[in-house]
Amino acid sequence: MATDAQQACFEAGIKFGSLYHQFAGTPVSPSSARSLETAMAEAIENQPFCESVTVEIHDDRVMDAIDHENGYTELTGSLMDVEMRVRYEGVRIDTRMAMADGYPLMELVDVRDE
Amino acid sequence: MATDAQQACFEAGIKFGSLYHQFAGTPVSPSSARSLETAMAEAIENQPFCESVTVEIHDDRVMDAIDHENGYTELTGSLMDVEMRVRYEGVRIDTRMAMADGYPLMELVDVRDE
Amino acid sequence: MATDAQQACFEAGIKFGSLYHQFAGTPVSPSSARSLETAMAEAIENQPFCESVTVEIHDDRVMDAIDHENGYTELTGSLMDVEMRVRYEGVRIDTRMAMADGYPLMELVDVRDE
Amino acid sequence: MATDAQQACFEAGIKFGSLYHQFAGTPVSPSSARSLETAMAEAIENQPFCESVTVEIHDDRVMDAIDHENGYTELTGSLMDVEMRVRYEGVRIDTRMAMADGYPLMELVDVRDE
């Protein structure tokens, strides 16, 4: 009933919601940010139709968020950018999460028949 | 660039991924299943464009999964059915998660212009 | 090797870490806070040696944290107080999480042989 | 009111509950298991009093748990062993999680004044 493009967008959304709510709250500091980026990307790339994921945690934002006594903070959407490519049947979807007007926004960047 | 229907499907997917990965792993027993169903539904209904969520945790499956010594198990997709309605601009999406061939499947049930 | 009191404190810590990291990040608003409080308490009460859990989400703090456009925020330790009683062998432990100097602090309130 | 050793055991329990409930449910396969092990260890090592964490995800158990169609499974306690050292004031705690009688058991291995 849904078109391939609609199904592809549904699949892309599932991956974004999964990534966000699986890892939000993870303790993070600049020294652990690299391993968390890699683990997040590789974990979600396991999911069906997910071709590639890139996670960039911004160390400067992590530093700003850190309580100087604790030395770490908890991962939230405002600390990272995410790019993801999903492919379903002949449709390629590019999506990203980035800050917009002070809030993390998940968005469809490109929906393309190939 | 994306159509309203594609955007609606993306939003529906986000809610499903969120619900699943926020709550998977929660300790659950028949005596706590009702409050968890309600909390899951009301939490996700907070998200934008999410009109309604229904979560049904099957007590018989929970009982089957329980280690008799512990008295509880951890929530997984195989223990519950979820129905969700998302509305974005003029598009209404009905989605559900249910068991199919032994695995929980998230699927678009209906995509409708209203 | 560990004493009963030490084991009881270990068990109390497990419950606190579980509660925090299972539910941190959950979408929450004043209208969904009551069901989330109940679900959190009942979920953790399933765990062994956990006698009672009380979660209080502060609506005024939730309102302060809400982006007025979205209408909800994500659960963090700064929005709630938690009290928990654990009983292991003859030892009763009372613990709580509350704000201290601007940060949520998990602490042992009382360790008592009964 | 609590002794240093009791406080140390409480802190050790917090780390274990955090690790488990933050990462349970993460999509995992043999090809992503190494990055997840590293990210889990480094994330929890950020927490106060946590000296070292080692996570070993068993590829053979992951393979057994994988749905051959999907190519991945979700992380649970039965797929991994964890060792953790916590140091609080003069007390050193060694803890581990490993399978016992078919279930993952978190346990205090050693509580030592130094």
Image (spheres, coloured by chain):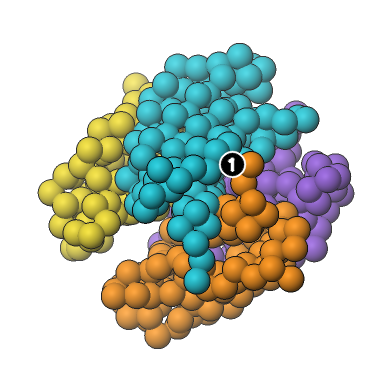
Chain colours: A yellow, B purple, C orange, D cyan
The quadrant where residue B31 appears = bottom right
Determine the chain carrying the residue at label 1: D
Query: Residue D19, can we see it?
Result: no
Q: Amino acid at mark 1?
A: Leu
According to the image, label 1 marks what residue? D108
A38 relative position to D112: left or right: left
Horizontal side, residue D35 vs residue D18: left or right: left
Seen from the viewer's position, the closer of residues D87 and A60 is: D87
In front here: D99 or A58? Answer: D99
Which residue occupies the foreground of this view, C53 or C110?
C110
Location of residue A60 in the rendering, given as x and y in whole percent from the top left corner: 13, 49
The reply, left or right, for residue B11 in relation to residue C8 is left
Q: Position of residue D108 (x, y in %)?
A: 59, 41
Residue B25 visible here: yes
Q: Residue at x 60, y 27 (%)?
A: D79
Residue drawn at x 32%, y 80% as measured from the top left:
C64
Residue B87 x/y as whole percent: 49, 61
Q: How many marks?
A: 1
Classify B36 as above or below C52: above
Residue displayed at 38% across by 28% down: D38
Residue extending furthest bottom?
C60
Which of D54 and D23 lies nearest the eye of the viewer?
Answer: D54
- Please tell me how crowded label 1 is: few (under 14), some (14-19), or many (20+) other residues with Cα within 10 Å: many
Residue D63 occupies quadrant:
top right
On the image, the x and y values in percent for residue C44 come to 65, 60
Farthest residue to the left: give it: A60
